[in-house]
Amino acid sequence: MDESKAVDVPMGQLRPLRDRTVGKQEYNRILASIKAIGLIEPLIVYPEGDAYLILDGVQRYRALAELGAEVAPCIVGKYREAFTGNRMVNRISPVQEHRMIEKSLEELDEQSIASALGVLSITHRVKRKLLKQLHLAAATAFDQGKITKACARELTHVEAERQQEIVTAMDGYKDYSIAFARAMILKTPRPLRETRGHKKSPWDKNGQRKDGLIQKLAEAEHRHDFYSRLYKQYTIDLLRLAIYARSLLTNARVREYLDQSHPSVVSRFEAVIADAKA
C-alpha cells in the first residue's frame, strides 16, 4: 500500500468506514494520551467524494472530536478495503514502547506519560539498561516476542557478537527457550563472556544444572541433524519422483491412456511436478 501522502483533514470531512466499540478504559487511555502528549499516530483515511473514510483510527478520531480539534493529521491510503478489523486494533511491541517513552521523556516527566498511558508508573517499562546491552538481533527477537524478557537478560551475559550467534542458532533450531539460551551461553568461550556489572549466574556455578543444560543442547543438536537428514532425503525422493512423473506425462501414448482411464493419477503427477519446481 502506498501511504506516503500526509494531509491535515478537517474533522467535518472525516467519516468512519467501520464502527468498532471499545471498552471505556481503553477509550479513556486514548483520550488521556492525546490530551497529554498529542496525537502520535495519524489516522489512515481514503478519499471518497468530498469526505475521507477512516480506515484506521476511529477511536483517535472520536477522542480528537471530544477535545475540540478542528483538523486531524492523516495518511491517505491507496485502497479502500486495505485495512481489516484486526489491523485496526493497534498494539506496540516492548521495544517500540520503550523508544516511544524514551522520546517522550525528552519533553515530559514520567508522571505525565504514565497518566497518558493510564498507568500508575512507567518506571518498570523503561528498560534503558537492558536494551543498551542487547545486540540488534537479540533486541529484534525480544521485540517480536520470540524471546522473553528473562531470556533477553540472560543474553546480556555474553558479548554482542555472541548474542547474534545465539539468536541465529535459536532461529535455526526453532527453540527460543531460556534453557536453550543458557546452554549456548555455557558453551561460549570466555573471551566472549560479558562480565562487566554482572554477578555470576546460579546456573553458571551449579555443576548439575550446567550438565543438564549441556545435555539439552546436545539433544537439540541431534534433533536438528535428524530432521535435516530427513528433509534432504525427502527432497531427493521428490525430485526422482518428479522426473519419473514428467517422463510419463510427456509420453503421448501414456498421457492419452492416463487422461482417459486414470485422470486422478494425472492430477497427482502434476501436483508432484509442481511441488518439485517449488
Image: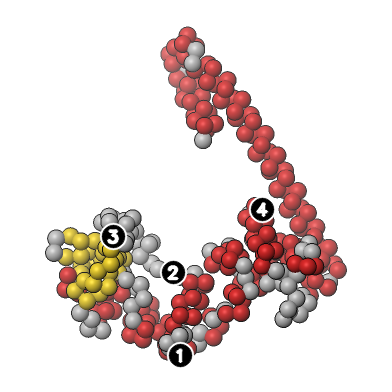
Given contact means CB atoms under 8 Å apart, are the residues at marks 3 and 4 in contact? Answer: no
Give coordinates of residue 231: x percent, y percent. Answer: 65, 39
Mark 1 or mark 2: which comes first in sequence?
Answer: 2
- Asked whether, in this view, residue 182 is left or right of residue 234, the answer is right
> Disc 1 and disc 4: Cα gap in Å?
43 Å
Residue at the extreme top: 253
In the rendered image, is residue 261 in sight?
no
**Residue in view at x 68 percent, y 43 percent:** 227
Q: Which mark is residue 109?
A: 1
Mark 3 and mark 1 in contact? Answer it, CB < 8 Å.
no
**Picture quadrant where residue 182 is located:** bottom right
Judge whether 255 appears above or below 146 on screen. Answer: above
Which label's residue is closer to the chain start, 2 or 3? 3
Answer left or right for 104 relative to 16. right
- The image's mark for residue 173 is 4
For mark 2, what is the residue?
91
Tell me the kind of residue under disc 3. Gly
Foreground mark, 1 or 2? Answer: 1
Which residue is denoted by mark 3 in the rendering? 77
- Number of the front mark, 3 or 4: 3
Residue at 32% over, 71% down: 42
Marks 3 and 1, how far apart in space?
Answer: 35 Å
